[in-house]
Image (cartoon, rainbow, N blue to C red):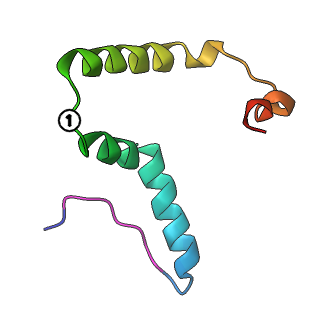
Amino acid sequence: MHAGRRIPVNTDLRSAFLKLSKRLQKNSVFREWKLAARHEKRGIKRSRLRTERWRKRFADEVYIPASNKYRNYL
């Protein structure tokens, strides 16, 4: 019995891997995996979770124009 998600694989493996990576990114599996690699102190974890909840709660109020979206990364 499987408890996880399934992604149908047709002849195109590339599209299946892209779907898998998008689903993992959406469910933040990689981020949790990286966080679990090292021990995180209780207070630091609490503050990180607090800021994540805050950002998630008010994410719809922040508007970034499409032209300025990647300006800080260049």
Q: Quick check: 60 left or right of 17? A: right
Q: Residue at x 23, y 29 (%)?
A: 40
Span highlighted in magenta in the image: 3-9
Q: Quick check: 40 left or right of 23? A: left
What's under tag 1, amino acid-wise?
Answer: His
Q: Residue at x 79, y 39 (%)?
A: 74
Q: Residue at x 34, y 66 (%)?
A: 6
Q: Secondary structure at mark 1?
A: loop
Residue 12, above or below 31: below
Taking depth in this image into account, of 18 and 31 the one nearest to the observer is 31
Q: Quick check: 47 left or right of 73? A: left
Which residue was labeled with disc 1?
39
How many other residues sit within 10 Å of disc 1, few (<14), some (14-19) or many (≥20)? Answer: few
Residue 17, above or below 37: below
Find residue 17 and report its horizontal and vertical position in percent. 50, 70
Q: Which corner quadrant of the image does residue 62 belong to?
A: top right
Q: Quick check: 63 left or right of 21? A: right
Residue situated furthest right in the rendering: 67
Find residue 10 and report its horizontal and vertical position in percent. 50, 82
The reply to whether the magenta stretch includes residue 8 is yes
Image quadrant containing the N terminus: bottom left
